[in-house]
Image: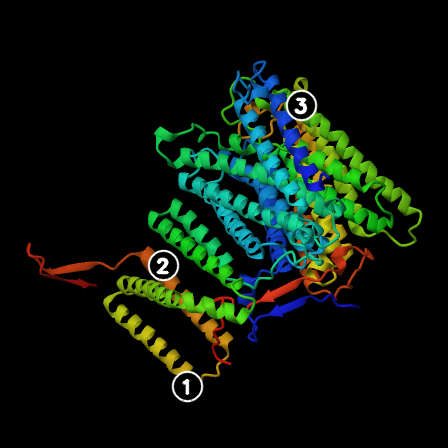
Amino acid sequence: MLTTGFKLWFGLCAAALSAAVFAGYTSGGTETGPISLGWKGGVGDHVTYVLFVTAAAVFGLLAVIAIAFRDADSEAVAEVLGVDTPPPAQTQVGSSIWPVLGALGVATLVIGLVVSPALFVVGLLLLVAVSLEWTMTNWSERATGDPEVNRELRERLLRPIEIPTLAFVGIGVLVLAISRVLLASSVNGAVLVAGVVGTCVFGAAFLFSRRPNIPRRVVSTVLIVSCAAVLAAGIVAAATGEREFHQLGGGSGGDHVEVGE
Amino acid sequence: MTETTADTIRTGDVVPTALEAAVTTTDHLRIGRAWLASGVLLLVVSLVAGLMVSAERMDLTGMAVFGDVDSLFRFWSAYRVGFVLLAVVPVFVGLATAVVPLQVGASSIVFPRAAALGFWVWVLGAVFTVAGFAIDGGLGTPGAVSRTDAVALTLLGLLMVIGGICCATVCILTTIVAGRTAGMDLSRVPLFTWSVLVAGSIWLVTLPVLAANAVLIYVDLTGRSAIAFGVEDTIWGQLSWAFSHPQVYAFALPLVGIAGDIVPVAARRRHGNHQALLVLTALIGVLSFGAYAQAAFDIGTPVREQAVFVVEAFLIVPLALLVLVGLVDVLRRGVGSRRTRMPAPLYLSVLSVFLLLDGMVLGALRAVAPLDLLERSTTGAQFTFTIGAALLAAIAGTLWWGDLIVGRVAPQGFGLASALAVAVGIVLVAVPDTISGFMGLADFTGGDRGGAGNPEAGVDVLNTVALVGSAHLLVGALGWLVTGVLRLRGARSLADPWGAHTLEWSTSSVKVTSESPLLDAAVEVGA
């Protein structure tokens, strides 16, 4: 019996193919061109013909899949598996950060295409990392029937890679951002900025160690806001540019000292 | 009052923060709400652009609003692109993401993480597209006033928008095909689900073509001359097929399903022939395939003057008429038995089918060569009728299923008033544009009034009416936004407020939350 899905997509396929032939004959195609996919003669307007034929191919493929899997009807699935009760149509999955990070990767890549090749590479790396993480997450969720075991499995495999990588990237970005700020500030300003940032980091670390019961929400908020502030300051400083440096000493040997104003 | 509850599976004891929940969610209702909210906000942005263009058209010689023709063109094209790809289609995707899984008895959307990815890619792409239009980019001619890098940003944003919509559509279509509950044959799915299946199939074979157009233009814009395709000077010409007949029908197609689901419940009568409506929807889908109707590499007879374009334009009209007849028949049989007042979404959904039919009739007239309407303002009128009808149906859909999606009651009267403002706006914009088109006014009227084709003084009056219509549209959209905000603060909804007894009102969503989704692992910080 033909399934509803097959009827829909095969109908779309047949319509697209008919439209291709009709368009071919009415736009200058030869006698046999439109019905032989251009093998014997011209097909008329190439763009129109190719688009209709491609659409027909896609719909045809969908029609074949639909009838091969009986429209994925639960009863058909149960019959194929030889069980009385159809299995659940889908596995429940938990919330995940990877979709939004993946989108940010695409966005970084796009901005990189417009602004800077370096940013394009960053976006590409982010996409690769997200793809790997997403794949591993999906694999681990289906590794065994016990979610706890699955999670431990994933952690055992990925934590040794994730934590050093995140630390390397995180520290690198923060160091880069703070260095931009220090280079953009005046000599005294840079000393002041370094002192204030160092004191804030030390003070926060001291506070968290003394009060382990601080709510997670507060800790996350403080960390996120601080990182965002440092990043924003780094971007602004990078856009502003470094302060002027005057070279002391000289000569061709390269032994000289740079002093900022 | 009965509270609509949902099952929740939590893998730990730590409750995610609001921020974590927002950015890491895979709950189809939450993702659907995100699509809807973003779509409505971007609709307002698009309609502001439309209003500015209408205001400029009042006196093109002065160019008081934009200052130059390029800027006017940029906003004119931004309005059309934004109305479709940043507003109406995303709202339909949002409705489908939230409602379709429940209509087919699935507890969640299939590939929920991919659905979330689709939303985030779309929303970031939308931001880039709007930014591109705003910073002298858009789809105008680069090198004049437009900046090449800003045009590139617009094109890449558009690619992300298309990618996001396609990703979400794949998830929805897979849910319909592979996520149905036992006993639900595809031929028995609700009409909204069916219309999304048909429309989604068409979107998936046409939107990639639009993306390919954008890629070719991008290559021409930024690549070396040796690989140029020669289309960088006519960007809008390459992309405009997606925003006119017949492709606009594919974007508006879910409105048939919205009306088809609302009318029988509101009228308390079944469809006379459910199968016939399925077939009609599929046929409209077939005829709305519009990727071929593009100007890319046009040689010989332009495709819009070829027979296939004309035949398609005329065949689709009786199909829409039959859909309308079917709905009116259900209404006719139901009205006599109804003692209570009909709900607002009923009126809006039927009105949307009327407006769609208007758009299709106009589309058919555009295809008549002696009338010479292809490049006239009838193009804009047809766009407004069709996409406006889709917008009206989307409002009807949110008023109908909003209780299910948000779990709270909206002021239906306020929603109806907003939708009526939209409906009046559609008519006030589209009718003058239709008349102007017959009088010879061009679709895009630039600074040179004579060259653009502004033949008679009567057009000025029509432009004034269109300006009022644009203002109505914007007010209606803002009203829709306010309705949504008021719904968030409304009373908790009933489990089945319309007495529909259909599957979506009785199926519960399953929400799965990870205890620490930002790391996908059990890391506890503090208590």
Q: Residue at label 3? A: B310
- Outermost residue, top side: A31
Marks 1,2: beta carbons within 8 A: no
Check the picture and name the quadrant holding the C terminus of chain A: bottom left
In which image quadrant can residue A45 be found?
A: top right
Q: How is this picture coloured?
A: rainbow
CA distance for labels 2 and 3: 55 Å
Check the picture and name the quadrant holding the N terminus of chain A: top right
User: Which residue sits at x=75%, y=48%?
Assistant: B190
In which image quadrant can residue B427 be found?
A: top right
User: Which residue sits at x=56%, y=39%?
Assistant: B207
Q: Residue at label 2? A: A235
* Horizontal relation, residue A84 to residue A121: left or right: right
Q: Residue at label 1? A: A210
Pointer 2 local density, CA inside 10 Å: few below 14, some 14–19, many at least 20: some
Q: Nearer the viewer, residue B462 or A91?
A: A91
- Which amino acid, by three-letter code, is at mark 1? Arg
Q: Nearer the viewer, residue A125 or A18?
A: A18
Q: Chain of mark 2?
A: A
Same-subunit check for callouts 3 and 1? no
- Which amino acid, by three-letter code, is at mark 3? Val
User: Which residue sits at x=64%, y=68%?
Assistant: B8
Disc nearer the start of the sequence (1/2)? 1
- Which amino acid, by three-letter code, is at mark 2? Ile
CA distance for labels 1 and 2: 33 Å
CA distance for labels 3 and 1: 78 Å
Q: Nearer the viewer, residue A192 or B238?
A: B238
Task: Decide if residue B198 is in sight here.
Answer: yes
Q: How far across and how far down the image is residue B167, in percent?
A: 55, 48
